[in-house]
Amino acid sequence: MLSEAASAIGIEVCVLAERRDDAATSVAGEVLYGSGFDAAALSALARSCDVVTLDHELVDLDALAELAAAGVAVRPGPAALLYAVDKAEQRRHLAAAGIAVPEFIVLEGEVDADVALVVSFAAELGAVPVAKAARGGYDGRGVEAGDLSAVLAATRAWRAAGTRVVAERRVGFRRELAALVARRPGGESVAWRTVETTQVDGMCREVAVPGGVDDATSLAGAQLAVRLAELLGVVGVLAVELFDTDDGLLVNEVAMRPHNSGHWTIEGAVTSQFENHLRAVCDLPLGATDGPAGAVATVNVLGGGDPLARDALASVLGVEGAHLHWYGKAHRPGRKLGHVTVVGVEPAEVAERAWRAAAALGTPRRRDEGGAQ
Amino acid sequence: MLSEAASAIGIEVCVLAERRDDAATSVAGEVLYGSGFDAAALSALARSCDVVTLDHELVDLDALAELAAAGVAVRPGPAALLYAVDKAEQRRHLAAAGIAVPEFIVLEGEVDADVALVVSFAAELGAVPVAKAARGGYDGRGVEAGDLSAVLAATRAWRAAGTRVVAERRVGFRRELAALVARRPGGESVAWRTVETTQVDGMCREVAVPGGVDDATSLAGAQLAVRLAELLGVVGVLAVELFDTDDGLLVNEVAMRPHNSGHWTIEGAVTSQFENHLRAVCDLPLGATDGPAGAVATVNVLGGGDPLARDALASVLGVEGAHLHWYGKAHRPGRKLGHVTVVGVEPAEVAERAWRAAAALGTPRRRDEGGAQ
């Protein structure tokens, strides 16, 4: 989606990909093959580009820091990326700056002592906390939200593997929100409307705009995202996942790249998150973020039992106003393979159409979830 | 733009390109190098694809006919393409079907006799006709609309080169319009809103939606385009350039591909002409064509004196709501290098912004033209 946006505005893209069937290879002008953890591959990429940016967090911060030290424009920079890559660093940095986050402890000592710390933290909270691996998690992986024994077992396993762990209170929330901002090197930033997300088992299933987000909450989310972008020194897009609680907004996660919660901006806003990410990292004027005029629903397409068949494509395109974005990734049950966006007037109607289109591609139907993480 | 749309919905594109710097090569998953007039290159393309389609008319109809005869899905088919490639065939076919076209004669005899025929046609009209090479014209090339001696000289030169010529009445029109339709193999078709175009020296400079096109005229244009698509057996997008005259709509030109007059659909309609062209040639359900809610202006970016500089990109992206589409073509003064679309409420306001953005890229400013071809 970044490459599609780059193509339109005449920015040439060189992709560093691990495999020939990586989705991004099919729309990039130039493709280099190699690992983002290989300093030589990163150097080759840097020589091909004016600006290096990223679309995931599984990166080698040290190698990026070396590039940046050598004068390569790495945006966002490694100092900012640390807070997206490492939940322990992020929680500490945000808490120190007075940003509301769930109560947490960081586990980075001896395995047995850390497990004992989780037990006493649970006693202190009067509830079982959730455990998160500080690095490497994605779409619910790296998070253990089961009962106490499961949380202790995960903590033990991660700590034994040398991974720091964050244990934190499960927040009772009214809804989950996501705020989105793009920021240029000089600090100019623009925010989109704050949206409502529906997460199931740690994976985003649906984004509703405006969803249950009133204008005041939307503005509060946007202001918080702008403040975080400034605090963390982000260049590019910053997505902030939020808990909307009786006590206000709490930061759940941050991502420094175009984010699933912002895919609605392709059809629903004047400028998409992808184009503004490119504008921001290239230090070009940011585009207007107005929109949507009505309601937007974006539903993720998850791999079902069967791979995509041609008939399925016909079915999804047969849903009125369904905008399909297919990522070209290999099929695997439960994997995010794409998304569908519908723009319209009636929220229930656009959601129904988006879910119907996603279901035509094998996505399991929505199940209603209670208001707890 | 076709490749960008294909990428989104998961259709894989293989491009047959003549040169490594052809714009389409940078966003296609697979690129074959060769000429569209080389049967071997076309066969190689056909072996790589389920469907062969085209984005210009400079094609070898005989070679395409051979592919089609061998069972390759060439869409639109060669029988339809003939009417887009050859103005003489098109004028005769439309006139025979009772479609309103300007009064015309086809010149295909001896050179001196043909020149004499133009002289008597001019006498009959009481006006100097315009002369058009039946094949190979584009953006005003292949058209002579000067005084009688220029028209006769062009006729003589084209006939001497073996090119058939169409001489036709210069139509006095209120405005120039363009109608746009997409049609599937089975006949299902959808039409977009008919738009107003501004042509200068035979080249489209601006598209305004709705422009001066009222709902009744828009509907008449759409119905005419649907009828033409059926009559000509088009699969894919058909763009019909029209003269809006005191006597109704006259067909000026037809194109069987996504067309400059339909670029506004990327931002201004639910489904773009590019996506619906792909859907149509792949025999998938067509997308909704609703829109725009307000006003849209698309202005072509023409090469000015200087090639695009980075500052120019910053300037154009600094115009509020300006959507740039940059084609990645080599710079040449007067060449179409891209376009800018602005969507908004006030027609004068969106046009001003689109022209300002195009001017930032070196496009000569609009000059007002009278109501004659």
Image: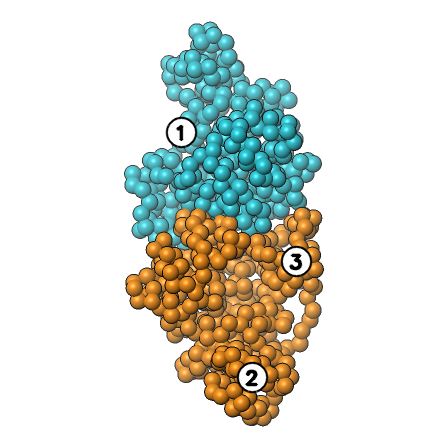
Chain colours: A cyan, B orange
Q: Provide the secondary structure element on which disc 3 rests.
A: helix
Which residue corresponds to the image point at 46% horizontal and 42% vertical from the top-left? Answer: A25
Rendered residue at 52%/59% (across/down): B265
The residue sitting at 43% across, 15% down in the picture is: A161
Which picture quadrant has residue B63?
bottom left
Looking at the rendered structure, the kind of residue marked 3 is Ala
**Percent x, y for residue B106?**
48, 84
Q: Residues within 10 Å of mark 1 (few under 14, many from 20)?
A: some
* Count of picture labels: 3
Dots 2 and 1 on the same chain: no
Asked if the residue under mark 1 is in contact with the one under mark 2, i.e. CB atoms within 8 Å, the reply is: no
Location of mark 1 (residue): A201
Q: Residues within 10 Å of mark 2 (few under 14, many from 20)?
A: many
Query: Distance between the Cα atoms at labels 3 and 1?
Result: 48 Å
Which element is circle 2 on?
Answer: helix
Q: Amino acid at mark 2?
A: Arg
Residue located at (62% from left, 51% from top): B321
Closer to the eye: label 3 or 2 = 2
Secondary structure category for the residue under label 1: loop
Pick the front one: A168 or A72: A72
Residue B291 vs residue A303: left or right? right
Chain containing the residue with disc 1: A
| Tag shown at residue B156 | 2
